[in-house]
Amino acid sequence: MYILRNIMRFLIFSLIFLLVFNISVYSQKSTRKSDTKPTKAKTSELDKLRNEVIITVGNEKITFADLEKAFRKNMNRKDVKLWEVSRDSLNDFIELYTKYRLKVQDAIQRGFENDSSVIADITQNRRILAESYFLDKKLVDKMVDDMLSKRDRELQIAIMLFQFPMGNENDTIAAYLKGKACLDLLKQGKDFADIAKDSSDDKESGERGGIISTYITAGRTQRPIEEAIYKTKPGNFYPDLIKTRYGYFIVKVLKSEPRIKVRGSHILLSEGLDKDSMRVVAKADSILNLLKRGADFARLAEENSEDPSSAIKGGDLGAWYSRSSGLENTGRNLLAPFEEALYSLKDGEISGKVYTDYGIHIIRRDSSKAFNIESERDEIKKLYKRIYFETDKRTFLDSVKKSFGFNIFYDVLRELVSSVDTTKNNLDTTWSKDISNELRNKNLFTFNNTSYKVDEVITKMNKQNDLRGFGLNTNDFKVVIDKISDPLVFDAVSVQLENEYPDYANLLREFRDGILLFKVEAMEVWDKLKFDSVLARSFWDTTKHKYFTQPVYDISEIYVLSDTLANELYNKLIDGADFSELAKQHTQRAGYREKNGHWGRVTAKDNQLVKIVIEDNLKPGEFSKPHRYDNGFSIVKLNNFEAQRQKTFEEAIPDFAPTFQDLLQKHLSEKWISSLKSKYNVKINKDKLTNILNSLKKMS
C-alpha cells in the first residue's frame, strides 16, 4: 500500500507539472493570435457569453471560460473550441471536472490547507514554479524577443581575426596589440580588405578581403559579434575590438538586407566546359533564346540540365532558401555567384549565364516570401537556453538580488576564509572546527531586510547535499552564498508575480488544488485499499472459472551440435540406454551436463523445448527423435506431465488482485463522490451551456 500511495503521489505531481507546461505554452500561444480583431460589440458579447456561470459546486461558480480553459489544459487540446467538441465528450469531461472540484472543496472544508505537510509541499512547489515562471517572463522571453526582432534582417559582414595562442588563451596581449594597430589604420581611412588580406589570422576569409561568404542573422554567430554588427550601419566598421574566446575581432557590415525565403530553379551546363567552352556557352545562349521566346523552363531543365537531382524536378532546387540559413531541407548554402544572381532577380525572372565552379547556370527565381518570425520562437528559445541562459541567469539574478538589498559582508567573508584550511573542502568533517563562536554569530550576508549569520551558512553546508564538496576559498564561499540566496529571490518575487500575471496566480491555485486532492483522496480511497481476504474470496468464487494453471512438463534434454552424434545417441536410447547417463556424458548445452540434462518443470510459455514434446506427442517416460534446435540437435524426454487445472484461491490471487483492487477503488470513489454530492449542492445548467455553444458556433 505504501508503494501504491507513492505511485499515486508521483502521478498527481507529474500531472501538475504537465499542467504548468501546458499553461505556459497556452499563454504564449494566446499572445500570438491572428491580427484579425473582432469588433468592440462582438468582443463584448463574447465576454458576456464566456462569463456565464455553467456549473455550481457548493459555493464555487464555474463559468464557460473556466470550463473551456480546464478542458484545453487537461485534454491537451490547446486550441480547441468547446463547440467543436462532441457533446458526449464534453459531458464526460464535465462529470470528471465536477468530481475534481468536489474533492478539492472537501479538502478545503476539512482544513487541509493548514496541514503542515500540505503547507510544506505548497511552499516547495511555489518556489519551483516561481523560479520557472519568473525567469521565463523576466529574462528568457525578453531575450528571445530581442533576438527575434533582429531576425527580420540578414547581414553580410567582413572580419579580421587576431587569434589567441593555441593552448594559452590567457595570453591576449599580442593579439590585442595587433588588432589595435589594424583598427587604428582603419580609423585613418585605410582599406578594410587590404588590411584583412595582410593581417587577419583567418586566412580563408582574409583572401576575400575579410568577407564571410554566408549572410548572418541573430542567433547565428557569437553574441559579442552579433551585438556589434547589429549596432553598425552598412558600409561601416565597428569602432572597437570585439573580444571572444577565440581572439579579438574587427567587423565591418557590408550589407543589411530583408530576410526573405526564395524558391529557385536552374539549368546546369558543365559537360565539356574545360575542353570546348565555346560550345557550352553557345548551348547556354541557345537555351536562353528559347526561354525568351516562351519555352517551358521545366521541360528545358529536364532535357538539358546536368544536375540530375534537380533536373528530374524541372530544375527545382527542392526547398526554400535563405542566405543566412541555407536550404531548409539540408542547411546547405549555395555558391556565392549563384546566390547573388538568385537574389538579384524578381519572382518569375530568369538570369543570364551565371558561372560557378560547377559550370554555367541559368537561374529562375520562382517565388519568395517573408519569414514568419514567430514560427522560429521555439527554435530560438531552445538555442538561447542552450547557449546563453546560464550566463545571463547569473547576471540577472545578481541584479534582482541587489534590488532586494542583497549584500555580502566581505570583511566577515575574509575572516571566515582565514579561519579554515583552504586546501580542504567541506566534505572534511572537521573543516569548521576552528571557526570561533564570535565569528559564527556575525552576519555574512543580508537579503530583503534579513541577515544570515556565518553559523547558518555552516549548518547548511554540512546538511544540504547541493552544498557538499565545495572548497573553502573565497570564490567557493561566494558560490555557496548564491546557492543559498537565489531561492530567496523566488520566494520574494512570488507575490509580485501573482499580482502581475493572472496566469501565475491560477497556476499556484492549481498547484494547491492538486496537493489538496492527493491528501484527501489518499485518506478516502488509497489508504482504505487494503486486501480484504474475505471480500477477495467472495470475488474469486464468482470468477474462479477464469483462472487455470498452465500445463506443466518435467523434461530432460540431450543437446549436441552434430546430427550424426544425435542419431547415434537416439539409437542407443532405443536400444535401452539410460537417458540421464547419456545426457551426463554427451549433452553440450552449457551447465546441463552436471544436471544430467534435466530442465525441471517448465511450460510452453517459458521453454521452447515443450514444442518438441507436443509435436512428438510424448507421454511420461518417452523421448523424442532428434530435432534441429538452437543451432544444434535436441532429444527431449518427458519425465512427468501435470495437466491444466483450475487454480486454488491462493494461486489465483496474482491474477485477479488488480481487477479486484480496481473494483474496490471504484466502489470507494463512487461512495465518496455520492456523499459529497449530497453534502455540496451541484448544479449543471445544460440548457444554458447548449445556448452558449450554439451562439459561439454562429459567431465563429
Image (cartoon, grey):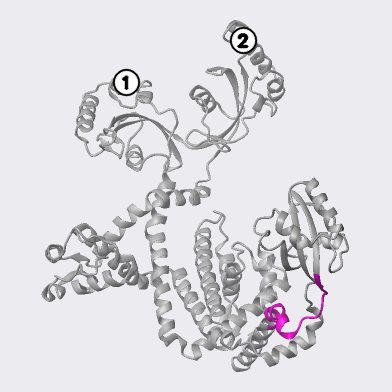
Residue located at (37% from left, 60% from top): 138
| Residue under numbered circle 1 | 197
Indicate the amino acid at tag 2. Answer: Gly
Q: Which mark is residue 318?
A: none
Residue 184 falls in image quadrant: top left
- The quadrant in which the C terminus is found is bottom right
Seen from the viewer's position, the closer of residues 240 and 231 is 240
Name the element at disc 1.
helix
Task: Indicate whether 420 appears above or below 315.
Answer: below
Residue 480 falls left or right of residue 284: left
Taking depth in this image into account, of 597 and 379 the one nearest to the observer is 597
Total labels drawn: 2
Q: Helix, strand, or loop for circle 2?
A: loop
Tell me if residue 58 can be seen: no
- Above or below: residue 136 compared with residue 291: below
Q: What is the magenta range?
A: 640-660
Q: Taking 629 as reference, is 683 left or right?
A: left
The circle on residue 272 is 2
- Front residue (pair 86, 211): 211
Whether residue 559 appears in this view of the structure is yes
Residue 37: % across, % down = 56, 58
Relative image position of residue 378 (x, y in whole percent): 50, 52
Up the image or down, 568 lies above or below 79; here it is above
Q: Which of 431 and 488 is in front in this view?
A: 431
User: Is residue 653 rendered magenta in the image?
Assistant: yes
Which residue is depicted at the point 44% across and 69% down?
A: 504
Mark 2 surroundings within 10 Å by alpha-carbon count, few (fewer than 14), some (14 through 19), many (20 or more):
few
Whole-angstrom CA distance, mark 1 to mark 2, is 35 Å
Is 581 part of what is drawn in magenta? no
Residue shown at 67%/70% (left/top)? 695
